[in-house]
Image (cartoon, rainbow, N blue to C red):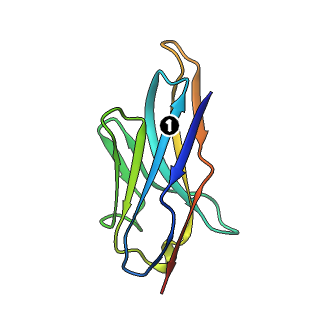
Amino acid sequence: QVQLVESGGDKVQSGGSLRLSCVASGNIFSLNAMGWYRQTPGKERELVASSSGDNTVYAPSVKGRFTISRDVGETTVYLQMNSLKPEDTAVYFCNAAGYSGYEGPHFEVWGQGTLVTVSS
């Protein structure tokens, strides 16, 4: 079983910065991709940024303001959020996909979410 624990959510003023962290633990052989999603009430969860190998993907709304990175061991993913706007207010979820063994099984898991509130 694989678990994700997020931290770093807080309330900040518009223009401020936050850094989210997500640590993966458990029965992990390889982590192929880690990413961040966010969700607001009444809306679908949306991709914010993802990291897979040398590839990173950002939502157009955060490109140039947010940076996703992973630690050397690649079991922790960070989301550095700068120039925050009120529309960035959401619950941010960490996501990870990989394998628990050399030949599987594959897993995809979600964290519990961390709240980011940006006030104007």
In this view, the residue farthest toward the top is 103
Q: Quadrant of residue 4?
A: top right
Q: Is residue 83 left or right of residue 117?
A: left
Q: Position of residue 96 (x, y in %)?
A: 51, 39
Q: Position of residue 120 (x, y in %)?
A: 48, 87
In this view, the residue in front, 116 or 52, is 116
Q: Residues within 10 Å of mark 1 (few under 14, many from 20)?
A: many
Q: Position of residue 118 (x, y in %)?
A: 49, 77
In this view, the residue in front, 19 or 29, is 19
Callout 1 amino acid: Ala
Q: Position of residue 30 (x, y in %)?
A: 44, 25
Residue at 52% x, 15% y is 101
In this view, the residue in front, 69 or 19, is 19
Residue at 51% x, 63% y is 9
Residue at 59% x, 46% y is 111
Q: Is residue 93 left or right of residue 50?
A: right
Quarter of the image that includes the N terminus = top right
Q: Is residue 82 left or right of residue 38?
A: left
**Above or below 101: residue 12:** below
Residue named by callout 1 = 24
